[in-house]
Amino acid sequence: MVKNFFSFVFELIKVVAVSLAIIIPVRYYLIQPFYVKGASMEPNFYDKEYLIIDEISYRFHAPARGDIIVFRYPRNQEEYFIKRVIALPGEKVRIKDGFVYIYNQADPQGVKIEETYLPAGDKTYGLNEEIITLSASQYYVLGDNRNSSKDSRSFGPVDKKLITGRVLLRGWPFDRINVFSAPQYSY
């Protein structure tokens, strides 16, 4: 009887140890759950949706324009935000007449980006119409609900070191399960 009990405990300890050896690295280095709070990404993401964040991809390549990322809020790194990457390191961004313009080596005169993921007729308004130049490690991010989003227009560009990862999958609610990739922009 005692031998069976110790055998059971030993087996239980092995199962827990193997499980932790698998789960902990996956949770802390590969993927992470994220819970949406607020309306800044509507209509693409709603409050209380459950997302899975890919934490490993950006160790091998940089975020792309259109990626939906989770990052630490630059003014309080205890908070996490979800936004869409609009401008990349070294680029310039300008918000004018409700549209976003990107200036880079390929388009030094600037080009208006077509944001098909936004509801028809939605405009992007900036605090002013200045051109923001990003450093070699900064990204300009905006929420999809432009009228209700605290984003780079208010807190400035996001440094790469603050980016946790990109949204890989929406797991809840079940009727909105989806795998995400960056949209293709047509200029």
Image: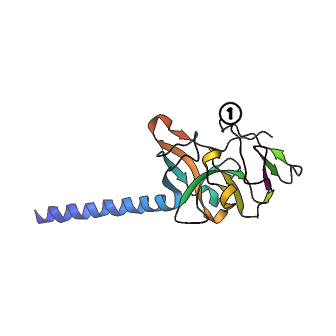
Q: Nearer the viewer, residue 171 or 61?
A: 171
The answer to whether 159 appears left or right of 130 in the picture is left
- Front residue of 64 and 122: 122
Q: Where is residue 3 in the image (x, y as percent from the top left)?
A: 14, 65
At 69% from the left edge and 61% from the top edge, which residue is drawn? 156
Q: Mark 1 points at which residue?
A: 120
Residue 130 at what x, y percent from top left?
80, 56
Q: What residue type is labelled 1?
A: Ala
Quarter of image, res 132? bottom right
Splitting the image into 4 quarters, where does residue 139 fall? bottom right
| 129 vs 24: above or below | above
How far across and down, in percent of the image, does residue 9 sit? 22, 63
Q: Is mark 1 on a helix, strand or loop?
A: loop
Q: Nearer the viewer, residue 91 or 6?
A: 91
Magenta residues (range): 87-100
Residue sitting at x 68%, y 33%: 120
The image position of residue 67, as x and y in percent, is 65, 49
Q: Looking at this view, name the residue that lies furthest to the left.
A: 1
**Count of marks, rendered view:** 1
Crowd rating for badge 1 (residues with CA inside 10 Å; few <14, some 14–19, many 20+): few
- Which residue corresponds to the image point at 68% horizontal and 41% vertical from the top-left? 183
Residue shown at the point (88%, 52%) measured from the top left: 108
Q: Magenta includes 48?
A: no
Question: Does the magenta portion include 92?
Answer: yes
Say left or right for 17 vs 111. Answer: left
Evaluate whether residue 62 shows in this view.
Answer: no
Quadrant location of the C terminus?
top right
On-image quarter of the N terminus: bottom left
**Lateral position of residue 24 relative to residue 89, left or right:** left
Residue 128 seen in the current view = yes
